[in-house]
Amino acid sequence: MLHAAVLLPFLAAFFIPLIYRGVKQVHLGWFVLLVPILLFGYFLTFIKGVMQGVHTLKTFEWIPSLGVNVTFYIDGLGLFFALLITGIGSLVVLYSIYYLSKAEKLGHFYVYLLLFMGAMLGVVLSDNLFVLYTFWELTSISSFLLIGYWYQREKSTSGALKSMMITVFGGLAMLGGFLLMADITGTASIRGIIENGEMIVNSPLFPFILILVLLGAFTKSAQFPFHTWLPDAMEAPTPVSAFLHSATMVKAGIYLVARLSLVFAGTDLFFLIVSGFGLLTLCWGSYMAVTQTDLKAILAYSTISQLGMIMAMLGFGTELAILAAVFHILNHATFKGSLFMVAGIIDHETGTRDIRKLGGLFTFMPITALLAFFGTFSMAGFPLPFLNGFLSKEMFFDSSLHFEDASTIVEAVSPFFPYFAVGGSIFTFVYSIMLFFRTFTGKQRGTLSKQPHEAPIGMLLSPMILVLLVVIIAFIPDAFGHALLSPMVDAVNGSVGETHIKFWHGFGPALYMSLSVLILGTALYLAREKWQHIYKAFPGKLSAAKAYDGLINGLLRGSRKLTNGYMTGSLRHYMIYIFVFFIALVGITMSVTGGFQINYNDLAPIAVPEVMIAIVMAGAAFATVFMKNRIAAILVLGIVGYGLSLLFVFFRAPDLALTQLIVETVTVALFLLCFYHLPNFDKKKESKRTNAVNWVISISVGVLVTMVGIASHSTKLFEPISDYFLKNSYKLGGGDNVVNVILVDFRGLDTMLEILVLGLAALGIYTMIKLRPGKKEGND
Amino acid sequence: MEIIMSILAGMLFTAGVYMILQKQILKIIIGTALLSHGAHLFIITMGKLNRGKPPILSEGVTNYVDPLPQALILTSIVISFGVTSFLLVLAYRTYQTNGTDNMEKLRGNENE
Amino acid sequence: MSNLAILPILLPLLTGIILVFLNKRLPLVRLITRIMVLVNLAVVSIIAFNVIQNGTIVLKAGDWTVPYGIVLVADPLAMLLVVTANLISVACAFYAFKSLDEHRERYYFYPLFQLLIAGVSGAFLTGDLFNLFVFFEVLLIASYGLIVLGGTKEQFRESFKYIIINLFSSMLFVTTVSFLYAVVGTVNMAQLAERVGEVQQDGVLTTIAILLLIVFATKGALFPLYFWLPKSYTVPPTVISALFGALLTKVGVYSILRVFSLIFVYNLSVTHQILLILAGFTLVFGVIGALSTNNVQLIIAYNIIPAVGYMILGIGVFSATALAGTVYYLLHDMIIKAALFFLVGAMVAYSGTSDLRKMGGIIKNQPLLGWLFFIAALALAGLPPFSGFIGKLLILRGAFEEGHYVLGVIGLVTSLLILLSVIRIFINGFWGEPKSEYVSNGNPVQGKILPAAFLLVFTVLLGLGAEFVYPTVQTIADQMIDPINYIDSVMKE
């Protein structure tokens, strides 16, 4: 059943194109909507069990012999994410029905969306590392397709590529970490790994593993400096941004860190990296968000910053921090989801998302404005009792102040954390307020392509539900706390503590932090013209984006340069590479293994005629090198060949001698025939240097081959098998000439194939001569 | 004797390699021919040279040279012959279609 | 029973020879080719099934006692590769008459093609080192014939380089076989393994092993011996590129796999260390090559090289896991390379250029082509759940388990860059606005897509349905780790 649930979106994705083709009247989204709603209902049924600590585990054997099984596991953490994915998914699909007109390629859109939904469910429910990785990459792929949905646009495709490169990069790093973890613990099951967490933490490879896994989490959750793909991902249709790039997919990294907290948390390295990068991302994201002009870009940087905040809290690792983190995941999904939808509505109804053009929309779109109010003020952590964002922000401040039984490093670093927390939050406050006021109040600043008006109710429905949740959560946080958050903290932290969430914390440091954010934030917002220029002085203007572009372009340019540098197309160069490689490898191996040895004992006596022939042959061979005339060169080559056949005679190989004689004659004839058509030798001499290189290489090759030959001959370790041939040639082969018997009998297959080679050569020659491009066949 | 023959084969390799490093197609092909002579000489050397009768069975003789390398060389000679003839025709056609027999002018980077 | 082992060689061989004589009747030639590739696929599948169920079949050619005659050893590894080669053969046969011009078809494409398959199958099956040389020559000379088929000047230019380089390595091959014969006194692979094992690979044997490595590395396109590959694989017509890309380098890799798991396994710190280093460089330089060009066919051709790197990495690591990965990757790579060559071939045919900068928006009119390419690209980069993932996972797992962390990381980075190199084709070629004036002659693309789709089905099956194949591969790898299994199955016959 659980498998069927995860499979459902994939199945639906398969059938959607068919429905799309069949049913034209009804918007495709209505069919799609059934899927997340059904699944949401299904996952709701698990809440009760999970609250009582009942975890569900279902296994489907995929590649059991490899230990890769699709095991789905529902505990507090998995269930919460499953509900988030299907819940927000339902709202997004509903919203998309009004957002995307029927003229769009809806079939593609919903297929990608369903693929994503299934993949994301797979990520949060898988117990097997490699299955998790599989789904993880599938979310990257579906995100790639969704960002590139309007594939004619250059920006969409480059954004899609960027997101894919960065998230797949992280995914591969994560795979590396997974492989190491599986190797150390001997299991690929996450539960198994958590049980054996000690083994990983104590392994010398631990830092390596941690960094690899965190690379996966950080790239996916857009942590600094990998965040750069997320603003570019805003090229996707807005429902996608709301769903993937705010509520769910970017939280996969958070999920992973939370899931593996039981293994990693408690180590200083984990604390430093995760809190450090989290806080850095929080500050950088909110700082950058203030300077954006596109509504969606503001929201993108805001998402980056909020993800950083959640990440930081997971890094803190205290029970309070984790409760705050999971609480904020929920809250962020509600207010950010609604804000993205609002941004989409504004884009849809005014034709622009540029806040420099917008303004005074409150009069035209009061409901939208109201929704935006709740969203932005909750995001800002504005101290109002009906905003869930305030509650979690307060808990964040609180958690940045309290570190229990901390190690020395934690103690040394943690005092700085509250400042970062406040700093990031101030900017968060600024852009949230700015987003609201610049869009809805004041005067309209630019000309709009459409006359703005309120959106249709269907489009408003989804953000309304989310805003309603913002308020409800703020009023009854404990209900959510018990049902969803406690089991989740349990899964992340391994213990259930008190999860009472209250609005009023009393006069404490956290409240003062909130108040200073409020005051400083308001001041900064009002005085924004005065300090805007610091973005020029300290722009970091898309610095990570520049780094990415530089990397990719540098990679492409560098590879071109390098490859063209050695792939010259020159045969001489290629042969030089090969020979040099040969010399180096054989030389090294021989000296390392002591391969060279000479044995003077088992040798044939030296006979004068053979030596004479050898001298003539050697002379002739080198003469070919110096011949200026091609006919002379061929004839000298012939001398080598005939010399060889003479040697064969002396070496008791009459058949060979004969064959060599015939072949040599025919070859020389062929050479002469061919030379008739080819130009004479170049009279121009090669440079001294070229000749020197040639000589060094050719002599080295010759010497090495000779050495290996002598060494081989000197180490006859076994009797050759040829005695058998001599003994049995007549008896079994029926022939006196042993060589012939070997050829036609013992090794008949070789001979058959050698004839085939000749035939093939003939065929090749025939086609080369006969078939010429541009001519009619065979009239040559 | 085997050592002398190994050295001779090595020299054939040297000359062959040197020729292969030349520019003109013809010289390169001569180089390959030298290489194959060298290879065949190595093969026969790797059996036992000269110590025995030719491997044609006759009464009363018990000592023959190793017949297997000879059989291998025969196969190899025929194959080399096939390849060399193919190569010669290819050289001719390459020259004819490309208008040069200089391999340095046949780098072919234009479709990069 | 044991005679079955020759059928994978004999059937294409006879088909090829018959086709030479029927050459005048092209329709008949096409028909026979199509029937025979299917028959051959069916036959080898049955044999493979048989071998996997009942164990290795050893055929003593001419019925001579091992090791005096030539043996063909149809073990599970060889048969899996033969079956895969025949899958490629089927796809190529159907792609050929949709894509080749009639001249090329008439000038003995089909016979050369079938004889190439015979040579490849023979190389996989033979249990005799000299016979391996002969099969190499058969498949090489068939490839020479194919690479010049059509006679354009680029073809002649590149094939000359290709042939000279191969000629050197062939000469080195026979020379090395003779050296080996001098030391060990045999050319039968099982007996070689046995005897080399007895002396624990002493003295000059390691050097000889390295010579063999150079020979196979040249055929298998290892760093730094792959220079001949990219250009010479892209000048002939697509179907020939696909055949080469899928089969030829893999024979080289297979030979390395066989020789360095069966025979030379006693001085791992030299031989396999060298393999590891070469694998690392092959991965890096290969993928850099793939990023260096805008020619779509060259991108695919360059991508052959890092794939070889992965496989060699698995051999170098030399654990059962890694070897299983190499075998799996070998199967995957043969299929995916042919499919990718088909797909870019269709792209080039459709858009009339192979320059990525001049392409764009193809997916609008050719959605199926686009999506097949997308899947193929993901599979090539080794993303799950396609076939490339399983092999890569195993190889990397092996590398990490044996402590080769640097190479493991190189492997991971390489697969990201492979993805970049092919996804560039997807983004610039299929996405974006249409750019060039397309040459449209009827509907040339459809017939070219189907063979690719046929192959991609197997890519998906090898990924999602890994359980059907993987246990066999694991068994192969487990046996490969101990040469005695192969030696026994051959020598006891």
Image: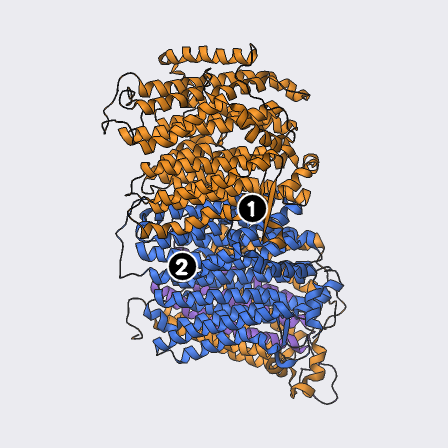
Chain colours: A orange, B purple, C blue
Query: Position of A674 compared to A408: left or right?
Result: left
Q: Label 2 neighbourhood size at 10 Å, few (<14), some (14-19), many (20+)?
A: many
| Number of dots carrying numbers | 2
Whether residues under marks 2 and 1 lie with C-beta atoms below 8 angstroms apart, the answer is no
- State which mark lies toward you, 2 or 1: 1
| Residue on which disc 2 sits | C342
* Circle 2 SS class: helix
Q: Residue at x 38, y 29 (%)?
A: A463
Compared to A186, does A674 lie above or below?
below
Identified by mark 1, the residue type is Val
> Which circle marks residue A131 in the picture?
1
Q: Is residue A678 left or right of residue C458?
A: left
- Marks 2 and 1, how far apart at CA: 31 Å
Residue extending farthest to the bottom is B59
What residue appears at the point 33 percent right and 49 percent down from the top-left corner?
A20
| Quadrant occupied by the N terminus of chain B | bottom right
